[in-house]
Amino acid sequence: MLETRFVKAAAAFSLTVCPKSLASGVTEATKATEPTEAIRATGKLLRRALSVTAIGAAVLFSGHVAAQQVFAAASMKDALDDLSASYAKETGKKPVLVYGASSTLARQIEKGAPADVFISADQDWMDYAQKHDLIDPNTRRNLLGNELVLIAPATTTGDVDLKTGADLAAKLDHVPNGKLAMGDPAHVPAGLYGKAALEKLGVWSKVQGKVAAADNVRNALLLVARGEAPYGIVYKTDANAEKRVRIAGTFPADSHAPIVYPVALTKQANRADADPFYKFLQTPTAQATFQRFGFSRP
């Protein structure tokens, strides 16, 4: 069983994590930035690919599968890092945390990446995992909620009234190379929510050509934090985690589908290791930590 899992994991990390995410990210970064920034983005993506490969290598060659392999949406990083440290202190077992766009993580699991727990930033990618028999549907739970916000660099002033016919396009036009940073609306949950909200407000057609599509929501956050985009669409928790940005507006809750983070154990999960952490995430203590970082109850 372990040997099979190692072989499948090797295929996932070598064929999916490095070439696919690297090529995708470089293309999006190149579209979103000037040549110098594209070079920086390429270097960053190379480091990220090597880092993920290192995680895979550690799993494959340590002689056993590391406890609690958790594949989680990128927007959960700060809260989940905090909870992981607390859990490790209490139990002596530190989960291995892998962050990324929910779409990318689901596809990695599909190709055999050794995940025990999967936390998606939307229902659609958890539905995908369930449809492809990647998770145990009996363990699927709605773990968290979030809000969708418009951010701007912290050095700026002025809010955007996010209502029907909002003047976001005009604000972008008044900024040189004015881009709207957001997760790729083709597959990244934050981007999908963002596109839906902009369509509901009647402004998507006006800003679509100005979108700087990122491979996950945290990279969209970075574009605004570094001043490379005047506005961006992220989750409230992302904005709370980055001091270099401010919230310029909050999208109406009815402008997009409810933002819900479902969690489930995978079909290949090592239940002896995965069950305790999976249950820990649903305790009042863990929920209080999530709320401290800005998440809400689903």
Image (cartoon, grey):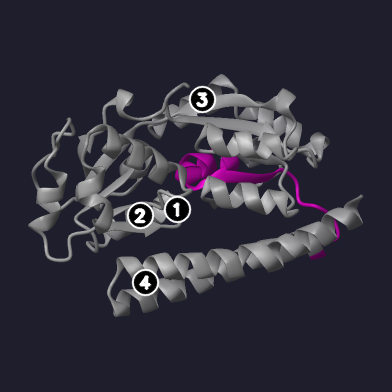
The x, y position of residue 184, in whole percent, is 41, 53
In front of the other: 97 or 87: 97
Please name the amino acid that badge 4 sits on. Answer: Thr
Of the image marks 2 and 3, the number of the one nearer the N terminus: 2
Of the image marks 4 and 3, the number of the one nearer the N terminus: 4
Residue displayed at 32% across by 74% down: 37
Give the CA distance from mark 2 to mark 4: 13 Å
Q: Is residue 146 magenta?
A: no
Residue displayed at 9% across by 46% down: 157
Q: As drawn, is 141 to the left or to the right of 57? A: left
Please name the amino acid that badge 3 sits on. Answer: Gln
- Furthest-front residue in view? 205
The residue tagged 2 is 220
Circle 1 — which element?
loop
Question: Could you tell me if the residues under marks 4 and 3 are in contact, i.e. CB atoms within 8 Å?
Answer: no
In front of the other: 15 or 141: 15
Please name the amino acid that badge 1 sits on. Answer: Asn
Which mark is drawn over residue 99?
Answer: none
The residue tagged 1 is 216
The x, y position of residue 234, in whole percent, is 34, 44
Question: Could you tell me if the residues under marks 1 and 4 are in contact, i.e. CB atoms within 8 Å?
Answer: no
| Residue 8 versus residue 135 in the image, above or below | below
Residue displayed at 84% across by 61% down: 7
Give the CA distance from mark 2 to mark 3: 26 Å
Q: Is residue 63 magenta?
A: yes
Between label 2 and label 4, give the one nearer the viewer.
4
The residue tagged 3 is 287
Mark 4 is surrounded, within 10 Å at the Cα level, by few (under 14), some (14 to 19) or many (20 or more) other residues, namely some
Please name the amino acid that badge 2 sits on. Answer: Ala
In front of the other: 125 or 119: 125
Range of magenta residues? 61-85
The residue tagged 4 is 30
